[in-house]
Image (spheres, rainbow, N blue to C red):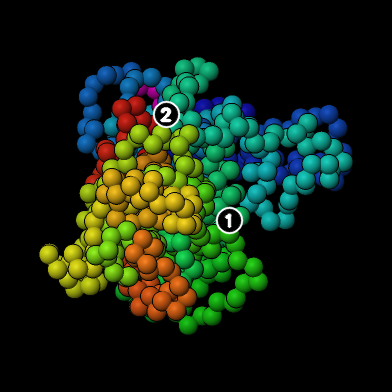
Amino acid sequence: MPAPEAFTDAGAAVDRLEELYTLATRFLREAFRHAMEKSPGEVRVRAFYPEIRIKTTSYAQIDTRLSFGHVSEPGTHAATITRPDLFRSYLKQQIGLLLHNHQVPVTIGVSGTPIPVHFAVGNDDAITVPQMGAADFTLRDVFDVPDLSTTNDDIVNGIAKPGPNGEEPLAPFTAQRVDYSLARLAHYTATDPVHFQNHVLFTNYQFYVAEFEAYARAQLADPSSGYSSFVSTGNVEIEKASTPIPPVDKQPQMPTYHLKREDGMGITLVNIGVGPSNAKTATDHIAVLRPHAWLMVGHCAGLRNTQALGDFVLAHAYLRDDKVLDADLPVWVPIPALAEIQIALQEAVAEETQLSGYDLKRVMRTGTVASIDNRNWELREHTGPVQRLSQSRAIALDMESATIAANGYRFRVPYGTLLCVSDKPLHGELKLPGMASDFYKTQVARHLRIGIRAMESLRDMPLERLHSRKLRSFHETAFL
């Protein structure tokens, strides 16, 4: 087993992480091929994730205006690492900040956490792990499989315990947790995680996809746009605006599209469909990629008679009745609006509509958005639900926004919501086919452009402003 090595250069540290990870996964792949061809006998095969460690001894105050990049107190902090090739830029940035802020080296070595064979062979299309009983041997008797003791959200939920030698977590996710989410992302979105960009738009309607593709093609046709390619379902990637994209036989659960830049600062659009469960699933897994922001741009029910179909709703508070995150983030935890996101969205609406100041109130209202887990809530007895909505001062209702915002808060990913009123069930305007189609034709393109404008504005914002201290508690990991 390679000995741990100290580094004072972030690039060299990441090179070592890549070397150790490549050696470990290559060993597991070769051993797995051999086991499938010949009986492995009783020999157990193991390889381990690489890890980063840093040890600090000083209580000296450092510049904490940046919300990340420094450990919260002296001691040993460690993180297991997977896919250093995918996270190279992120790792260089985070390790560089540690080296700069603490003036001590980081140590790169082999951890005590085994790499499950599923994750080691997952990036090799020529190898698949058979289902239990399909091989001539019992898989978990020979190879390691995912372990829930290291594949969980204990760190981000604030309940993680120190390691066996007292080390505190250095990063918000363990390597096994990251590997699990990378595998699920490929499954749910039908695109490789390598294509995901740092700015993610969520929507709850497929209508936005055609508009996103049209926008992407226009950008690819413009050499000065900064965008380099567009990725569609099945990892179909085009670099020219005129290149056709073949239709797919079967859509994934969450169709996802990526308008890419060479620096990863492009835009990803995810159609999560309808419901808080999908919203939680998508954000649970995308969070491991450490995006710089995610925004919900979907449709909602307007709750005020003064609203018109097509009006925008900028959420500044959330009434959580989605229930899917209650065990991870109690409903008494406030989900604050983030000023940087709010300003970007409001300015994007103003630019797109050519309205400002008091006139902007004609098409946009700011207020509380309620998210519920019952799609047909309006068919129930109204006294209780309507009274609660009224007391909360809610102006709109959907099934995803509060979930996405709450998971953004939980995972320390800046979040925001700009919805479009598509029906007013409390006022006799249900979403009916003819009305809906007229609405979609006129508003989807404008709404999507607003979301893209906001993301492009956030892209130009310094990280220390966007990743503010509002999302960090008093005992945080050093890594963003």
The location of residue 415, given as percent across then percent down, is: 34, 50
Residue labelled with disc 1: 188
Apparent side of residue 436 relative to residue 347 in the rendered image (left or right): right
Of the pair 307 and 9, the residue shown nearer to us: 307
In this picture, residue 256 sits left or right of residue 262: right
Q: Residue at x 54, y 80 (%)?
A: 244
Tag 1's secondary structure? Answer: helix
What kind of residue is marked 1?
Tyr
Q: Magenta span covers which residues?
A: 52-56
Residue 103 falls in image quadrant: top left
The residue that label 2 is drawn on is 158
Viewer-closest of 231 and 317: 317
**Residue shown at the point (63%, 51%) measured from the top left:** 123
Figure label count = 2
Say which amino acid is labelled 2: Gly
Looking at the magenta stretch, what is its main secondary structure? Answer: strand
Viewport quadrant of the C terminus: top left
Residue at position x 47%, y 21% in the image: 162
